[in-house]
Image (tube, grey):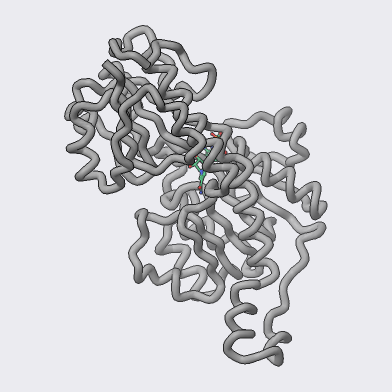
């Protein structure tokens, strides 16, 4: 029997050859329909918006492996997967460059007020140019919250390209690693926020980082500073951010992620001129999507073949107790 794989997200065409030996179902994007299709599948490749709980896994008795293109695993109940012998794989390195570049694009666009100036030129002509003075980044202070793969790369980009001073906050990174990155590590979040001209958020979403940036944190950020979030929406208290932006207590925000996702079409943040929003496309470049798709397809197929993936095994403790699959993969 060939394995049956449900796609709940489209994959880059270059990855489909890797799935040749499998019967591929989908992509079926709507979770309710995907849940029905999952019943007799051996593998699931899932996007960020469907929560893979123990109940979902229980509805799929043949399920052996869940694959997530990208790094974020906050929508997959890893403990429930491990308890059921289901292997979870992802591609942690694949989205790094594209997502770091997305943060950089938002930072540059906000500091030069590109969205506001573009809108104003279309409506009013060139005479408005004096109203849209931006700021230079050179020698200013960047605060990187979360110094993992993406945060480190953003730090590197802005240090190298604009000679920015980079402050970092990440309780799980040590001084030696920060020094290697040329980042001044601080142990107090408010200290970092207080000094920053640009704040960029890159922590994983955990119970600790939910609403890491709330009213108290926004209150210490300079009124001239900008905030960028390409991590996960719930890292920021959206209501508090809205109030800070409306009252001009911070200068602007660039947001690729929202809470909840998908965001409501009438999300009041969308009405503010000093906010740039993008639809969770941080990692979505030709290169990024290809790397994520190929990586997840390789990892899912190796699990189905009974081979331990070299990278991207999210719950390694399951390996000795995983459900065994008798398929020709
Ligand atoms: N917008 C997008 O399209 C997109 C794409 C890829 C990743 N992401 C998000 O970006 C996040 C970061 O990705 P990454 O590849 O750098 O992950 P990573 O695992 O390499 O880094 C996450 C960092 O967060 C740090 N962290 C944990 N708790 C923290 C806390 N309380 N305060 C500050 N830092 C804390 C960790 O120590 C780690 O260094 C992912 O978890 C994902 O949610 C978004």
The x, y position of residue 163, in whole percent, is: 82, 52
Q: Is residue 294 above or below residue 327?
A: below
The x, y position of residue 72, in whole percent, is: 45, 38
The x, y position of residue 221, in whole percent, is: 60, 61
Q: Is residue 95 above or below residue 249?
A: above
Residue pictured at 70% horizontal, 89% vertical: 126
Would you say 321 lies left or right of 190 here?
Answer: left
Picture quarter with the C terminus: top left
Q: Is residue 104 visible?
A: yes
Would you say 185 lies left or right of 122 here?
Answer: right
Q: Is residue 169 visible?
A: no
Pick the front one: 105 or 181: 105
Residue pictured at 58% horizontal, 59% vertical: 227
Among the 4 quarters of the image, the one containing residue 128? bottom right
The x, y position of residue 59, in whole percent, is: 17, 29
Picture quarter with the N terminus: top left
Instruction: Tell which residue pokes out farthest to the top in this image.
Output: 320
Among the 4 quarters of the image, the one containing residue 260? bottom left
Residue pictured at 51% horizontal, 59% vertical: 255
Would you say 13 lies left or right of 202 here?
Answer: left
């Amino acid at each position: 029997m060939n394995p049956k794989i449900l796609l709940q997200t489209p994959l880059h065409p270059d990855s489909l050859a890797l799935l040749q030996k499998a019967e591929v179902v989908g992509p079926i994007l709507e979770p309710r329909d995907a849940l029905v299709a999952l019943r007799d599948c051996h593998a699931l490749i899932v996007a960020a918006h469907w929560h893979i709980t123990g109940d979902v896994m229980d509805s799929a008795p043949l399920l052996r492996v869940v694959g997530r293109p990208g790094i974020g695993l906050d929508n997959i109940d890893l403990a429930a997967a491990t308890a059921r012998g289901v292997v979870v794989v992802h591609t942690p390195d694949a989205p790094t460059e594209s997502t770091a570049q997305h943060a950089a694009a938002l930072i540059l666009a906000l500091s030069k007020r590109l969205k506001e100036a573009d809108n104003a030129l279309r409506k009013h002509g060139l005479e408005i140019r004096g109203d849209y003075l931006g700021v230079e980044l050179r020698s200013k202070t960047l605060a990187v919250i979360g110094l993992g793969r993406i945060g480190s790369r953003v730090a590197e980009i802005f240090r190298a390209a604009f000679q920015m001073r980079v402050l970092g906050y990440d309780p799980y990174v040590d001084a030696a690693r920060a020094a290697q990155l040329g980042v001044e590590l601080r142990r107090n979040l408010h200290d970092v926020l207080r000094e920053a001209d640009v704040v960029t958020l890159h922590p994983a979403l955990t119970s600790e980082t939910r609403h890491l940036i709330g009213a108290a944190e926004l209150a210490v950020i300079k009124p001239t500073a900008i905030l960028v979030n390409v991590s996960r929406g719930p890292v920021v208290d959206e209501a508090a951010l809205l109030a800070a932006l409306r009252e001009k207590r911070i200068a602007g925000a660039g947001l690729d992620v929202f809470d909840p996702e998908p965001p409501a079409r009438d999300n009041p943040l969308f009405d503010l001129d000093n906010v740039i929003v993008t639809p969770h496309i941080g990692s979505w470049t030709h290169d990024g999507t290809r790397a994520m798709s190929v990586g997840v397809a390789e990892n899912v197929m190796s699990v189905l073949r009974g081979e331990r993936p070299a990278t991207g095994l999210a719950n390694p403790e399951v390996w000795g107790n995983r459900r065994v699959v008798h398929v020709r993969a």
